[in-house]
């Protein structure tokens, strides 16, 4: 009896590429499915259907569902921070650099929503998968370096105060800006801030940025007028004493 030929894992056009489109499609579909349903609720069948592939390719590239989830986490962290890590601050003043970093790192988009939903699921697992991914830690090492460089630039320019922990500052940025994207609908419904519209989101982010700037601003700018007034009073007294 003639043996049936096994189905090839890749089409010829895909097999010649270093990163086959099929793998990328699987990761993109998995990001949406894990983001929508969480690890437990996600279905590999649906992922392969959306990616226009088959389960055989999932096992070929990733091994199993959990390994696919870890690959999605790595990709999500990398993509989430990619634009911010490409940011060049050399020719920017510190405030502009911080604004650009925030715009790149915490941009309101569906990808950001999926990423944060996956992180919420991972938090329920006690960061079990993230702990096994050195690439995620390395990504954040690079992100914190950028944050530190911006803060140091601001201290040098006299616009930011010194002594700010870049890691704690980054955590504050995450809470301030990602919350608006993740909870846009509930916040809009509950308190009437129109975060679901581009204009409403832009206004809210601008207000948040002003608050952040106020919190890290150098106090020198406020103390100079006081010193100037004190000098003026002292000079006036000296002038009156000499007459």
Image (cartoon, rainbow, N blue to C red):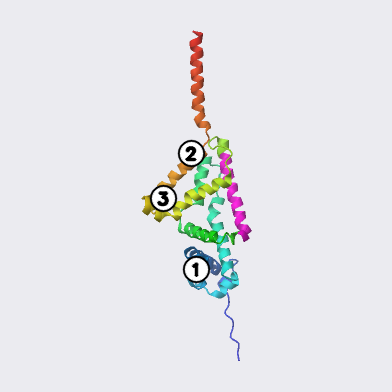
Task: Reply above or below: 216 against 179.
Answer: above
Q: CA distance from mark 1 to mark 2?
A: 43 Å
User: Mainly helix, strand or loop, the magenta region?
Assistant: helix
Whether residue 240 is visible to the viewer of this picture, yes or no, is yes
First of labels 1, 2 by sequence position: 1
Which percent across, then down, holds residue 38?
50, 64
Q: Are marks 1 and 3 in contact (CB under 8 Å)?
A: no
Which sits in the foreground, 67 or 52?
67
At 54% from the left edge and 54% from the top edge, which residue is drawn? 81
Rendered residue at 48%/39% (across/down): 214
Under circle 2, the secondary element is helix
Is 151 colored magenta in this rendering?
yes
**Residue nearest the viewer, comparing 186 with 143:** 186
In this rendering, the count of numbered labels is 3
Q: Quadrant of residue 157?
A: top right
Give the SS element for disc 1. Answer: helix
Mark nearest the camera among 1 and 3 is: 1
Residue underneath mark 2: 214
Quick check: can you spot residue 11? no
* Badge 3 or badge 2: first in the primary sequence: 3
Residue 130 location (% of width, % of height)? 59, 59
Looking at marks 1 and 3 on the same chain, the residue that comes earlier in the sequence is marked by: 1
Residue 226 is a magenta residue: no
Residue beneath disc 1: 41
In the rendered image, residue 29, in percent from the top left (x then y), is placed at 50, 67
Q: Position of residue 212 (x, y in %)?
A: 49, 42
Q: Is residue 220 above or below residue 108?
A: above
> Label for residue 201?
3
Q: Which residues are magenta?
A: 131-153
Q: CA distance from mark 1 to mark 3?
A: 31 Å
Q: Left or right: 240 with respect to 138?
A: left
């Amino acid at each position: 009896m003639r043996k049936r030929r096994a189905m090839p894992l890749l089409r010829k056009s895909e097999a010649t590429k270093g990163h086959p489109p099929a793998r990328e499609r699987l990761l993109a579909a998995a990001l949406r499915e894990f983001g929508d349903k969480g690890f437990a609720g996600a279905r590999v069948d649906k992922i392969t259907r959306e990616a226009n592939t088959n389960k055989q390719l999932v096992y070929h590239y990733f091994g199993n569902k959990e390994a696919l989830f870890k690959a999605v986490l790595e990709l999500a962290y990398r993509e989430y921070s990619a634009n911010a890590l490409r940011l060049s601050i050399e020719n920017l003043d510190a405030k502009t650099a911080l604004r650009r970093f925030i715009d790149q790192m915490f941009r309101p988009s569906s990808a950001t929503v999926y990423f944060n939903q996956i992180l919420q699921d991972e938090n329920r697992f006690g960061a079990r998968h993230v702990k096994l991914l050195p690439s995620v830690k390395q990504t954040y090492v690079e992100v914190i370096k950028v944050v530190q460089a911006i803060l140091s630039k601001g201290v040098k320019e006299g616009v930011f105060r010194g002594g700010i922990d870049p890691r704690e500052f980054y955590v504050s940025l995450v809470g301030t800006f990602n919350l608006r994207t993740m909870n846009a609908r509930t916040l809009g419904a509950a308190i009437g801030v129109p975060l679901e519209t581009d204009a409403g989101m832009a206004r809210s982010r601008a207000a948040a940025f002003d608050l952040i700037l106020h919190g890290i601003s150098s106090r020198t700018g406020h103390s100079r007028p006081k010193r100037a007034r004190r000098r003026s009073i002292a000079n006036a007294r000296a002038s009156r004493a000499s007459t």
